[in-house]
Amino acid sequence: MPSTDIFHIEIQKVEGKTVTAHVKVIYQNQVIPVKPNFAFQILLELFQKCSKGYIWNSFGENYEFDSNEGKKMAETHPMKETYERMNGFIYGRRINITKEEYQLIKSGQSNERISTYGFSESQYYKMSPSNEQSYIDEAQELIESVTLENASWTKSGYPEGDLVLTVSDSNLLHHVRTGSSWPSTIYDMN
């Protein structure tokens, strides 16, 4: 997973089950993937920003709501479980465990497949491994169509265009607002 911003995303239009997002490449040797896995990551990344309160109107980011509104949208989102499951497929899922379970894992006595474990926020935890294939498969069901329109080149010679994506359920767009924009590290998984 990249740690450098690769794209700049701006939500231009939300209508029914369709979102138009202007996607601009801001890092060399990249293309705009016209794929469901990439399109859903736009929605997922915005959901994650809302749920964590990472809503700032500076450093290339702009939102039509503040951090508190973003958190509330995420907490009351009708598709919250879907977004949390999809996030778990990409990054793994945090599972709280007991001190005894933690000690078993730490001592090597657990045969369970995990990506990491630790202690934070006064709680022992383990992380399930990522499962990008499950993410890709489910993204294909959640995104009915994705097209690239108005493709062109920036002055810097990087591609840009409008990614038009249609979701299977309009409730997936509960948190998506016209005017939201942010630099992004999302990437094509296949």
Image (cartoon, grey):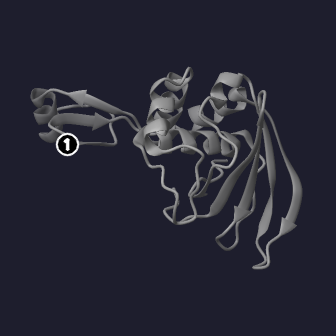
Q: Residue at x 53, y 38 (%)?
A: 47
Where residue 178 sits, quadrant-wise, is top right
Give the residue at x 26% y 31%.
111
Residue drawn where x is 34% and y is 42% of the image: 115
Please determine whether, in this image, residue 169 is positioned above or below residue 121.
above
The secondary element bearing badge 1 is classed as strand
- How far across and how far down the image is residue 137, in percent? 65, 31
Q: Looking at this rendering, what residue extends furthest in the right direction?
A: 150
What residue is pinned by disc 1? 120
Describe residue 124's horizontal placement relative to residue 68 as left or right: left
Let me know if residue 2 appears in the view. yes
Write the residue at 75% across / 79% down.
156
Residue 136, percent from left and from top:
64, 36
69 sits left or right of 106 in the view: right
What residue type is disc 1 on? Answer: Ser
Can residue 90 be seen? no
From the viewer's side, name the closer residue of 13 and 47: 13
